[in-house]
Image: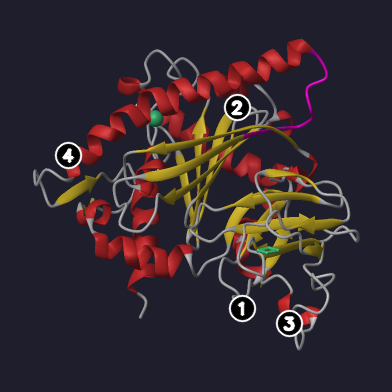
Amino acid sequence: MDHPTQVLLLKSLLTMIEQRQTSMAEAIYLNPVESYTSHDQLQREQRHLFDSLPLMMGLGSQLPCPGDYLTDDSSGVPVLVVRDDGGSLNAFINVCRHRGARLLDGAGNIAGAMICPYHGWAYGLDGRLQRLNPPGSFEGLSCTERNLTRLSVVEQQGLIWVHPTPGGQINAAELLGPLASEIGDFGFEHYSHYETRRLRRRFNWKVVIDTFLENWHFSTLHRQTVLPIFIPGISHFEGCGTHLRLIMPRRSIVELFDQPEEHWDLLRHSAIIYVLFPNTLLVWQGDHLEVWRVFPAGPGRVDQCLIDVSLHVPAAPASAKEKAYWDKNMTLLMETVDGEDFRLARQLQKGYASSAQRHLTFGKNEPALHHFHRAIQTSINEQ
Ligand code: FES
Ligand SMILES: [Fe+2]
């Protein structure tokens, strides 16, 4: 994010702090409880979102060298992303074209060729089948007919995007829309992956996103964890197409009242939350990045989700002290979000299923929730 934009946003935030205001929607928003409980809605989400939109897979810096790969099954499609010798990323369905074995597991580096664990067919980093084994057994077939099934992949502003359906195209210019240049300014392509944790939790996948979309619950739910760090109840919201940006000021931001604008630094004095539609959160945490990716846990699992949370830091820790610092950040993150938000979310899901009410009420002070759920409804209701 460039400095003039930071100053503009800071002026707005400092005014909000002086006047005890926050970004407001024009009216309250009634969100149907069915959005979290309906199997029909889950099917439409799978079809219109998770099968049809480019999905964020991680940071390009997780795969710096030729042969570096990652695999990901979260969307329901087994995806394999690998960096080739020319430095470009290729993405494939992670399925051998002989009899369908899973080609690679986890993440790592493969030198030269990807070899199927079942009968040993070998594929180049470009997905080409190198030879048909054993000789003579596949007469009439040529290697080119059994290359890996390719998926569209784009590396942009340090983020990897894959279209989960063969033949699906990614329009790179529209991926991040108006957020492209400000996200690019962070330089995430130079970041170092610190840690990823995978969670499976018993609530609808959208609850994870909802958790991050307002900060007035800090005063009640997070008194012992992040309330000492953040000013609760004040945030700056902006919708950016289907994406959104929400800025939550740290308490340290009040130092800026006494400083000249040229020294103002929004990034140090706030948390900046980007929802990259539909299922990714980038959470800028002052000096590092959290990435949250959320998926329904499978067909029919309207009340369960899979969550990937990753910490990315500006440089790999060079000392035990630096490592301890990032570990402390990870611990606080898990204590707050998993220990407090997600613990409560399990009860939320039970409440949704209880017939207590047909709608949740999003206040005017929760505009990010309005924006996210409107974008979901618009997308899943398209023909
Ligand atoms: S399934 Fe891969 S070589 Fe047979
Ligand atoms: Fe929270």
Q: Callout 4: 10 Å neighbours few (<14), some, many (20+)?
A: few
The residue indicated by pointer 4 is 351
Total number of numbered labels? 4
376 vs 20: above or below? below
Element under disc 4: helix
229 vs 310: above or below? above
The residue indicated by pointer 1 is 167
Of the image marks 3 and 1, the number of the one nearer the N terminus? 3
Residue type, numbered disc 4: Gly
- Foreground: 139 or 228? 139
The residue indicated by pointer 3 is 145
**Figure quadrant of residue 145:** bottom right
Q: Which residue sits at x=17%, y=39%?
A: 351
- Foreground: 105 or 67? 105
**Figure quadrant of residue 155:** bottom right
Disc 3 vs disc 1: Cβ atoms closer than 8 Å?
Answer: no
Is residue 184 left or right of 353 when viewed as pictured? right
Q: Is residue 194 visible?
A: yes
Task: Give, as a single range, the part of the protein colored magenta.
Answer: 311-319
Specify the quadrant that holds the C terminus: bottom left
Of the image marks 3 and 2, the number of the one nearer the N terminus? 3
SS assignment for the magenta stretch, majority: loop
Q: Nearer the viewer, mark 4 or mark 3?
A: 3
